[in-house]
Image: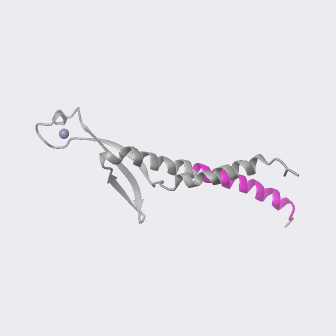
Amino acid sequence: MRPPHEPDLELRDKLIRSLGAFREMLPGSFVERQRACGRPNCHCADGKRLHSQYQISVLMDGKPKTLNIPAALVEKVRQKIEMRRRFDAAAATICGVNLKRFLKEKEDHPA
Ligand SMILES: [Zn+2]
């Protein structure tokens, strides 16, 4: 016999199975800054054609930190920070499903 179709539980299972894909997630937010490098002969010396510097803005031990991201790692780090957003969205959906189930379960157990 097939169990009754429960879309919420199917969604929850699907999300739970997807969480492993976020194991490399990174906290914080991705920041792009424009800066001059300070070399007088560089194209950035005109103050207009600046260099892009990518950073992670993150809390470490409760203190805000800004960490430079080496150029070779920028795309990877950007994706890992994005993973955290998707992880949080999945967790919020799972909690929403469970809260709905709790409210239903509560009806069967009058205080
Ligand atoms: Zn420069």
Q: In this view, does 54 lie to the left or right of 105?
A: left
User: Which residue is nearer to you in this view: 72 or 51?
Assistant: 72
Residue 56, position as x, y percentages in the image: 38, 51
- Ligand 1, by image quadrant, is top left
Give x and y (percent) for residue 68: 31, 51
- Assign the C terminus to one quadrant of the image: bottom right
- Give coordinates of residue 67: x percent, y percent: 33, 54
The residues colored magenta run 89-109
In the current view of this chain or complex, which residue is farthest to the left? 41
Horizontal relation, residue 76 to residue 92: left or right: left
The picture places residue 74, in percent across and down from the top left corner, at 36, 45
Tell me the residue at 57%/55% (across/down): 20
In the figure, 31 relative to 23: above or below? above
> What secondary structure do most residues of the magenta stretch adopt?
helix
> Is 62 one of the magenta-colored residues?
no
Residue 47: which quarter of the image? top left
Tell me how many marks there are: 0
Q: Residue at x 47, y 55 (%)?
A: 24
Q: Which residue is drawn at 44% across and 53% down?
A: 28
Q: Nearer the viewer, residue 44 or 80?
A: 80
